[in-house]
Image (tube, helix red, strand yellow):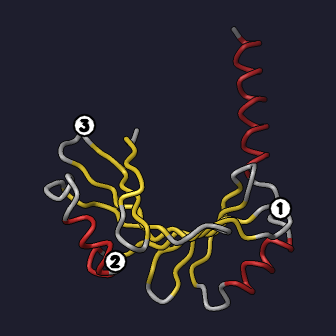
Amino acid sequence: MKLRLIFLFVLFAAIVNAQIRKIPAEVTDAFKERYPHAEKVSWKDNLTNFEAQFTLNGYKMSADFNSKGEWIDSERKIRFEELPTAVQDGFSKSKYTDWEKTDIIELDKNGDDLQYRILVKKSSVQKKYLYFDTNGKLLRDAVTL
């Protein structure tokens, strides 16, 4: 039993240690170049990439970079009223129009077109992510966990 506890402690320590490695200068420099006016910046090491969480112009945002400092993607939390009119119209014409809208995110991925993700729920059990393009076309819906 003691051996099992020691093993678990060592494993936990290794995981924690992996999570707190130093953010490479290439990553922080690339972030500062892309978001020079970012405020309240905090970093997460996701093992496969580095995620900055920050505020920019009053918006909560996150951005992912690989270990070479190459930008992967960004997310910006917005209000429904800030969505492009076409996306608002697309949502209102969808079968989810009577579902409660909770989180709305603008997704900007390197090499992809801008998308909008709307988290909707009908109950505490029925929740879905809806993905729209800038023209208001529902690209897909995905069940949340």
Front position in the image: 62 or 18: 62
Circle nearer the N terminus (2, 3): 2
Does label 2 or label 1 sit earlier along the sequence? 1
Q: Is 55 on the left-hand or right-hand side of 42? A: left
- Looking at the rendered structure, which numbered label has been put on residue 125? 3
Q: Which mark is residue 9?
A: none
Number of residue marks: 3
Q: Which residue is mark 1?
A: 67
* Quadrant, the N terminus: top right
Q: Residue furthest top?
A: 1
Quadrant where the C terminus is found in the figure: top left
Residue 105: % across, % down: 42, 67
Residue, x 81% and y 55% (percent of image)? 21
In the rendered structure, which amino acid carries the disc numbered 1? Answer: Ser
How far, Cα to Cα, is label 2 from label 1? 32 Å
Closest to the observer: 42 or 105?
105
Q: CA distance from mark 1 to mark 3?
A: 37 Å
Tell me what residue is drawn at x 75 percent, y 50 percent.
48
Q: Earlier in the sequence, mark 1 or mark 3?
A: 1
Query: Which residue occupies 78% across, 75% down?
Result: 28
Location of residue 138 by image quarter: bottom left
Q: Nearer the viewer, mark 2 or mark 3?
A: 2
Expressed as whole percent of the image width and height from the top left, the position of residue 114 reads: 52, 72
Q: Tag 3: residue type?
A: Val
Residue 133 lies, in percent from the top left, at: 43, 67
